Amino acid sequence: MGVVVIDAEVTLADVLSLRLAITEPLADGTRLVLRKRGAGEERRVTLGASGGRTRDASVAVSLAPLDLGPGRWDAYLEHDGVRARIQSADPGFSLDRLDAYALGRRTLAYRAYRTRNGFLALKIDPAEPVADVRAVWFREGRFEVTGLLAYTGLDDDDQHRHATLALRHTEPGRGDRVHGDPAATVRVAATVQGVRFHAALSLCDVLAATPDSQGSWEPYLEVDGVDRELPLGARLDDVEGKRRRVHYPRALVDGVPIRPSFTPGDELLLEVGA
């Protein structure tokens, strides 16, 4: 069909907005088809004609009424029984756009992206409030982390909010949370301004609270105005499987190694004795 996406975005209102370069006008009855990868489930939306001599076209499709579930949905154009995947020249990654999109309170997060083979697709994930990690480092005997509060509905303003960084201990080799033991949690004040956060705590305090100098700690934020704990994760960027792909240097505290890492669900961990 001679169609290439040159700009793809899911707007704040969950509308799929596309700019297309086309070799011939879109005909009446052309349909956008979204097909769920691995399941065969499909949604179809009829598009309007693009006009006589134009070499580009704009498409806007509201996604919420389509009842798309979590997963990956490949995009096709279909006309007169002929279907073709939509090629894309847009990598679909703009951190500024993703940050703005994540300011809203959502149950599903929609994202347009280009596949490895150069086609347009949608990635849909459940969206819950999270403290999205942007930087992690060890310095001067401290663990420090900065990031963005995502999907909380808080305003990106200059307001300072009372917040606490807490680390919950998990038993080595099990990943089970230790409940009911105050010694199994380390807490320290955190800084939150608008939706940006920064927190730091002593690695010596972490080591002192770790039984037998062996185990993992799950960090989370408690923020005034947010009705739940916010796990520290890294989900807004385009790097998946961070446990395999992202590796931090370790620090030695009294000869015991401490290292940040990620869970299979891309949530941050502090591993002691690893």
Image: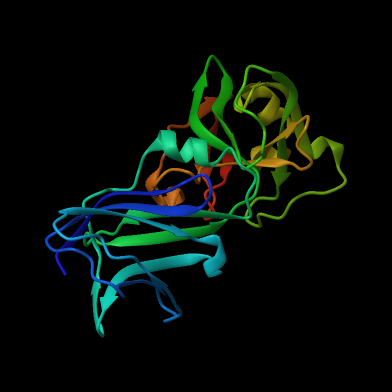
Image quarter of residue 59: bottom left
Residue sitting nearer the eye, 36 or 116: 36
Q: Quadrant of residue 20?
A: bottom left
Name the one closer to the observer, 129 or 18. 18
Residue 165 in the image: above or below residue 202:
below
Q: Nearer the viewer, residue 26 or 228?
A: 26
Q: Residue furthest bottom?
A: 81
73 relative to 141 in the view: left or right: left
Q: Is residue 164 visible?
A: yes
Residue 240 percent coordinates (x, y): 42, 52
| Residue found at the very far top of the displayed protein | 140
Which residue is the extreme one toward the front? 52
**As displayed, is residue 251 above or below residue 40?**
above
* In this picture, residue 8 sits left or right of residue 274: left
The front one of 200 and 273 is: 200
Task: Examine the rendered structure and indicate whether residue 237 appears above or below residue 161.
Answer: below
Q: Position of residue 216 (x, y in %)?
A: 63, 43
Q: Residue at x 24, y 83 (%)?
A: 80
Measuring 53% from the left and 35% from the top, which residue is drawn there? 133
Vertical side of 138 occupied by 20: above or below: below
Describe the colour scheme in one phrase. rainbow
Determine the image quadrant of residue 47. Answer: bottom left
Q: Residue at x 77, y 36 (%)?
A: 185
Q: Could you say where residue 131 lies in the image, as x and y percent from the top left?
A: 61, 37
Residue 272 appears in the figure: no
